[in-house]
Image (cartoon, rainbow, N blue to C red):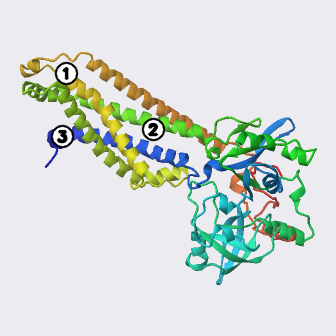
């Protein structure tokens, strides 16, 4: 049995198909545009949600003043992690993590390929939620030459991510080009980190490999040098620890270890890493990506409102065609609220159709939107949050877009309608004019804003950087070439195609850092 509202909607659609198609199509575009933005917003707001201990995890930050400028950085002294676990109550674990892209050339079964990974301490596996498909967190770094691979990297190396424990790979890890080739034993396989996770890697190897290498070459590791900054340090606090109390003890921790160091230390919560990690003069500003989230969320709602205004304008503009229907229904005893419910029901049906069409538009536009935002944004109708969001959007559009037409149409005087008299529309024309003006004003504002942003981007792309980008080639040698660089330079200069050659330890436009 068909619901009465659906029967009426189908009957009205058959009478005014073109109008309904236009209305549904316009609302669908609005829902699709807003939906794509909300997908990105969801991705940002759920960043790092994969890590179960997110509320207890922190990054150690340092505030330093140099040449009158105060700045905040994540680079920490190498011995800080062990010292704070031993000396500060409430600190359960701390682990060092080198976030530079450490590329390693891996040889196995006659194949050679590069992989990007990280050096870290074993407590990383107890702090962050890495799902082990083979091996376990407690024995991941049981030996110094252990390596933990992601499932995708294991498949690249061995053709499968099953049964690869204890297999040996030959690796050439790159730590500023200083480490020698060595054999690594696969001690674990973890699921690939989701893209909205702060920790990204294809392999993980023990941080202590660096110290072992330095000792073997007669170089004392900088563990006790509190003026030497290197890795990030992640910290897990006890569930009942007081963050303010811990930060009080951390503030002058480095100064107490080394009197000439004036750096101030504090823990920064993981829940703020993605959205609020903006500092000025050593203090958190409360800004960061959260500004983009708020701005784009506002734009999404404005686009939806414009789509709903368009719906209302079209509905009220064609009201005269349904005047007799309203008159007949009132004569037959249908009250005003009954008509309001009927027209709102029709609006909900059209909003639902627009919602389904909007999902189709989203699916078609998603690849281009992902390329624009530079992020993977999965559209999953099995995700409860996305389903609830879609239904909520449809419901809001149904109420907002259908409310004014419903109350406007239901107010018609049946006697005047059936006598064919010209109806007094009251302030309806004025309301439509206001809605049209608002709609066009907001649209013009968005168009002008888009042009301004486009011109700014073009300015950035075309401004003088002090170098000729079209004639500059940058090559990453992957390993140290200091000893043979003169030979390389000589060979290149003799080609007659090269004007000059230089060697640097960072990219050409590298902004610099500390330590």
Assign a secondary structure to mark 3: helix
* CA distance for labels 3 and 1: 20 Å
- Image coordinates for residue 7, horizontal then vertical, percent: 15, 43
Left or right of 349 in this view: 455: right
Residue 477 visible here: yes
x, y percentage for residue 238?
68, 50
Q: Which mark is residue 411?
A: 1
> Could you say which disc has been placed on residue 300 in the image?
2
Q: Nearer the viewer, mark 2 or mark 1?
A: 1
* Mark 3, residue position: 5
SS state under label 2 = helix
Q: Is residue 426 above or below residue 362?
A: above
Task: Identify the mark nearer the N-term, 3 or 1.
Answer: 3
Circles 2 and 1 in contact, beta carbons < 8 Å: no
Residue 445 location (% of width, % of height)? 47, 30
User: Which quadrant holds residue 177?
Assistant: bottom right
Q: Which mark is residue 446?
A: none
Q: Residue furthest bottom?
A: 110
Q: Is label 1 in a helix, a strand or a loop? A: loop
Few, some or many residues within 10 Å of mark 1 (<14, 14–19, 20+): some
Measured in 3D between alpha carbons, the distance from the residue under mark 3 to the one under mark 2, in whole angstroms, is 30 Å
Asked whether the viewer can see residue 177, the reply is no
């Amino acid at each position: 049995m068909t619901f009465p509202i659906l029967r009426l909607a189908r009957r009205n659609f058959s009478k005014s198909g073109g109008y309904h198609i236009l209305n549904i199509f316009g609302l669908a575009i609005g829902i699709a545009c807003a939906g794509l933005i909300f997908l990105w917003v969801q991705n940002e707001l759920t960043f790092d949600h994969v890590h179960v201990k997110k509320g207890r995890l922190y990054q150690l930050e340092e505030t330093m003043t140099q040449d009158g400028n105060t700045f905040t950085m994540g680079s920490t002294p190498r011995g800080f992690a062990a010292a704070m676990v031993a000396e500060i109550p409430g600190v359960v674990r701390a682990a060092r993590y080198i976030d530079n892209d450490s590329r390693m050339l891996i040889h196995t079964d006659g194949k050679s390929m590069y992989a990007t990974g990280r050096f870290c301490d074993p407590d990383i596996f107890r702090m962050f939620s890495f799902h082990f498909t083979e091996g376990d967190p407690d024995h991941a770094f049981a030996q110094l030459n252990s390596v933990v691979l992601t499932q995708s990297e294991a498949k690249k190396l061995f053709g499968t991510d099953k049964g690869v424990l204890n297999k040996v790979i030959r690796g050439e890890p790159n730590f500023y080009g200083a480490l020698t080739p060595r054999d690594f034993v696969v001690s674990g396989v973890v699921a690939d980190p989701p893209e909205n996770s702060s920790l990204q890697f294809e392999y993980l190897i023990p941080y202590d490999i660096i110290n072992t290498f330095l000792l073997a070459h007669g170089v004392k590791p900088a563990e006790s040098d509190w003026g030497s900054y290197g890795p990030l340090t992640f910290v897990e606090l006890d569930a009942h620890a007081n963050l303010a109390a811990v930060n009080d003890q951390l503030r002058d921790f480095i100064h107490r270890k080394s009197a000439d160091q004036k750096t101030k230390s504090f823990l920064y919560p993981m829940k703020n890493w993605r959205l609020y990690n903006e500092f000025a003069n050593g203090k958190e500003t409360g800004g960061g990506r959260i500004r983009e989230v708020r701005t784009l969320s506002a734009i999404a709602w404005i686009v939806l409102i414009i789509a709903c205004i368009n719906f209302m304008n079209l509905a009220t503009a064609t009201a005269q065609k349904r005047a007799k229907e309203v008159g007949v229904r009132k004569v037959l005893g249908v009250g005003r609220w009954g008509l309001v419910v009927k027209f709102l029901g029709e609006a909900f049906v059209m909003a639902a159709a627009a919602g389904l069409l909007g999902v189709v538009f989203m699916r078609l536009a998603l690849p281009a939107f992902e390329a624009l935002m530079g992020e993977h944004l999965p559209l999953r109708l099995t995700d409860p949050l996305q389903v609830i969001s879609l239904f909520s959007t449809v419901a809001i559009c149904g109420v907002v877009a259908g409310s004014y037409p419903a109350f406007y149409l239901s107010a018609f005087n049946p006697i005047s309608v059936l006598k064919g008299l010209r109806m007094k529309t009251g302030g309806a024309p004025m309301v439509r004019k206001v809605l049209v003006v608002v709609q066009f004003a907001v649209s013009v504002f968005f168009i002008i804003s888009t042009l301004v942003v486009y011109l700014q981007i073009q300015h950035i792309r075309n401004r003088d950087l002090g170098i000729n980008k079209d004639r500059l080639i940058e090559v990453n040698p992957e390993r140290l070439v200091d000893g043979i660089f003169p030979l390389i330079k000589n060979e290149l200069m003799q080609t007659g195609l090269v004007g000059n050659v230089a060697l640097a330890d960072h990219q050409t436009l590298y902004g610099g850092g500390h330590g």
